[in-house]
Amino acid sequence: MNALSRITIDPNICHGKPTIRGLRYPIESILELLSSGMTIDEILADYEDLERDDILAVLTYATRLSQVKKVEMVQP
């Protein structure tokens, strides 16, 4: 299974935000857990229906989103 195939977008789930395997775990929530210092093992212990490859898919997805050619500042 391709890592990114674990990331799904369905307008009927979490208001169309990217989630893991159609479950109600938005990508942003998993990234927030990781950025707060939780380890992958801690997340997996708290969310038993997630798999290690799900978390790795989240990181792959976030990496792809950050791969931009140019960033420009927007003036308010």
Image (cartoon, grey):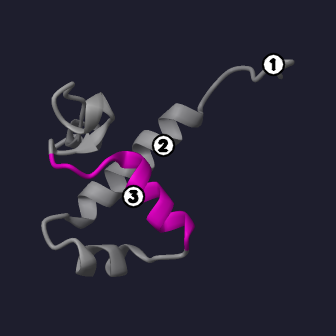
Q: Nearer the viewer, residue 21 or 24?
A: 24
Task: Indicate the amino acid at tag 3.
Answer: Ile
- Residue that lies at the very extreme toward the right in this rendered image: 75
Callout 1: 10 Å neighbours few (<14), some, many (20+)? few
User: Does the stretch in magenta take in 35?
Assistant: yes
Residue at the image position 15 percent from the left and 42 percent from the top: 22
Q: Nearer the viewer, residue 7 or 28?
A: 28
Mark before the other along the chain sequence, 3 or 1: 3
Q: Position of residue 6 (x, y in %)?
A: 21, 43
Residues in magenta?
Answer: 23-36
User: Does the stretch in magenta take in 63?
Assistant: no
Q: Is residue 59 left or right of residue 67?
A: left
Q: Position of residue 43 (x, y in %)?
A: 33, 74
- Identify the element where label 3 is drawn: helix
Q: Nearer the viewer, residue 11 or 44?
A: 11
**Residue linked to disc 1:** 74
Is 47 above or below relative to 11? below
The Cα–Cα distance between marks 2 and 3, rounded to whole angstroms, is 11 Å
Callout 3: 10 Å neighbours few (<14), some, many (20+)? many
Is 5 above or below relative to 53? above
Q: Are marks 2 and 3 in contact (CB under 8 Å)?
A: no
Residue at the image position 46 percent from the left and 56 percent from the top: 31
- Identify the element where label 1 is drawn: loop
- Identify the element where label 2 is drawn: helix
**Residue linked to disc 3:** 30
